[in-house]
Amino acid sequence: MPAQVVPSHGVNVFEVATYLGNNLKNAWVSYLKSLTHFYRPSGSGATFRALKNVRLKHCPRLEGFMPSDCELPSLVTLDILFCYNLKAIFYNNGHHSSPRHYQLPCLQKIRLHELPLLEHLYVGDAILTAPKWEEFQVRGCWSLRRLPRLHQQPDKAVKVSGEQAWWAKLLWDDQGDGAHHHRSVYKPSLPPAFTFVHERFVIKSYLR
């Protein structure tokens, strides 16, 4: 069963690396109108060693999930749904520079729905190592123009499910250092164009 977590001060689920945070395996967080971060450290980044499955849903003020220097060695699935203010999932917390390499060794699936302001999975020019990543599902994330640069072989292509119009506008490049940020690393699995509504206009903020 997912853990029932009460946010501290109403804006963060975690502020320090507590015993619960280090042993948490599953977290479902939903319908918290004031929540801005799942984890926002007061000092250096922590390691959620046991965290496997996360779902964040209907948190309209959410700004970030985890700082980019926080390790998630066991994360398998990440679902973020209907969090309209989210711009980066792994954000820079200001205490340290973003890491050059970011590792999610157990990641298998990411599902992102209706995150219209999302621009980055992580902030910075990091290279993602995710050898077990199999599926990336995207809906209504029109500001997301680049997929992560991956440090893994092209035959381990990630299956991408999303709107035709979104896929057509993605930007691709090669950055060297063994990172393949291009179509050969991602395998599109796209429905017919008429399945989805047309791209909506860009909104700078959903908050009033």
Image (tube, rainbow, N blue to C red):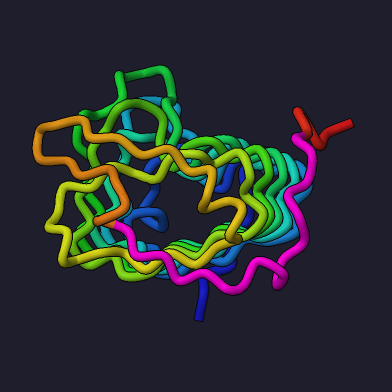
In the rendered image, residue 127 lying in the magenta stretch gets the answer: no
Q: Is 34 or 153 nearer to us in this picture?
A: 153
Above or below, comparing residue 19 to residue 205 in the picture: below
The magenta-colored residue range is: 186-202
Who's the residue at 29% across and 46% down the image?
A: 182
Asked whether, in this view, residue 19 is left or right of residue 14, the answer is left
Which residue is at a point 55% across and 62% down the rendered structure image?
162
Q: Is residue 149 above or below residue 113?
A: above
169 or 64: which is nearer to us?
Answer: 169
Compared across the picture, whether 42 is left or right of 69 comes to right
In the picture shown, does residue 90 fall above or below 55? Answer: above
The residue drawn where x is 31% and y is 64% is 158
Q: Residue furthest bottom?
A: 1
Please say if 202 is above or below 151.
Answer: above
Please count the marks in the image: 0
Name the dominant secondary structure of the magenta segment: loop
